[in-house]
Amino acid sequence: MRYRQKILSNVDGFDEDAIASSDLGLIWATISNAVPCAFWAIIHICRDRTLLSQIHDELRSSLHAAPPSKLPLPTSTTESEDGPFKEDSLLESESLMTAASLPLHSVFHINSLSDQPLLQSVYAEILRLYVRGFITRCPERSDLRINEWLIPKEKVILVSSDPAHFDPQVWNTANGLFPLTTFWPERFLVRKDAHRDILPRKTAPPLVAEDNLTPQETQLEPGHSSLATPDIDTKMPRKFTLNGLHGSWIPYGGGSRACPGRHFAKQEILMTVAMMLTAFDIEPLGDEKAFGAADMVLERRYLLGGSRLGSGGLDDGGKESRL
């Protein structure tokens, strides 16, 4: 906290109010998305035993033997009101091996962890599905025209991420099996089927019309794995990609002012998921209604601020039309 105060106090034009505002914004940004995203990733992974098994395989490949300097200190026994207990009990207990059959005294290599295709796809899908933010911009020098809309100079523009994250014209839904309001862990993986590449972005007209499909009609039955995508060769190598999703996957904003902490946030979320899934055996106890896709559907209503331009630059009557 003192270090942040020192850094912010050296910013030109920052008074005490500006420092306090920036400090609060930084604290809020570090926990507002990372914590709930890590939670939802763990919940979705643990609800699908097939997915959990494949994630465990990726976690094993990301483990490395801890260097001597990183090994836990010898444990000591201390008396408490409930009897003796061992310090560093988490590292010394058998729960780590029981949970994922992983060796003790190993550490996750963050670069290897961040390169696992399925884990990255789960991460990206969680952010697409659950992060609802606004990209803030302001025309500084002049009015901004976007098609038929006029944004006045020095007015704040808020762009919601929802329309991009739930655009049916952009995203692949496996021919309607996994609607955009549901969690599909493989949505960001590239893999071949018998005829074409399966990509996150919709690359060809669907084989089944999606217009009349609803999340309820395509809801998977209890116990049905979300990895069981039809017509896809599950033995083909998979690759994580965001190619073709520029402007469509924007949980961190975009452009030159994208969130500077996005790489740290990704590592934070992935490491939290990895530690929780290896240290604990987790079984969600909620019924299907508690976690079903139907409960995740939100009514998205958008209010746009700006002026609509008519043929002569203004609407009929020479007045600007505002929403």
Image: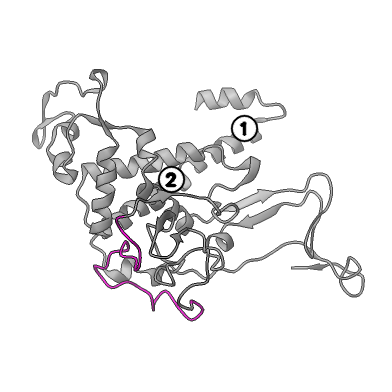
Residue 263, which numbered label?
none
Residue 142's x, y, as percent? 84, 48
Outermost residue to the left = 83
Q: CA distance from mark 1 to mark 2?
A: 23 Å
Residue under the point 28% across and 42% down: 59
* Label 1 sits on residue: 19
Residue 165's x, y, as percent? 53, 60
Outermost residue to the bottom = 212
Name the amino acid type tagged 1: Ile
Tell me, yes or no, whether the two marked residues, 1 and 2, touch with CB atoms within 8 Å: no
Residue 168's x, y, as percent? 53, 68
Residue under the point 49% across and 28% down: 1
| SS for callout 1 | helix
Query: What color scheme is it?
Result: one colour
Does residue 136 appear to the left or right of 65 in the view shown? right
Determine whether 29 is above or below 286 in the image: above
Q: Quadrant of residue 126?
A: bottom left
Q: Quick check: is 230 in the magenta stretch? A: yes
Q: Quick check: is 290 in the magenta stretch? A: no
Quarter of the picture holding the C terminus: bottom right
Determine whether 164 is above or below 67 in the image: below
Name the amino acid type tagged 2: Ala
| SS for callout 2 | helix
The front one of 267 and 121 is 121
Residue 34, which numbered label?
2
Q: Most prominent secondary structure in the magenta stretch?
A: loop
The front one of 230 and 81 is 230
Outermost residue to the top = 69
Crowdedness near tag 1: few (<14), some (14–19) or many (≥20) residues, C-alpha within 10 Å? many
Residue under the point 88% across and 70% down: 311
Question: What's the magenta region?
Answer: 210-235
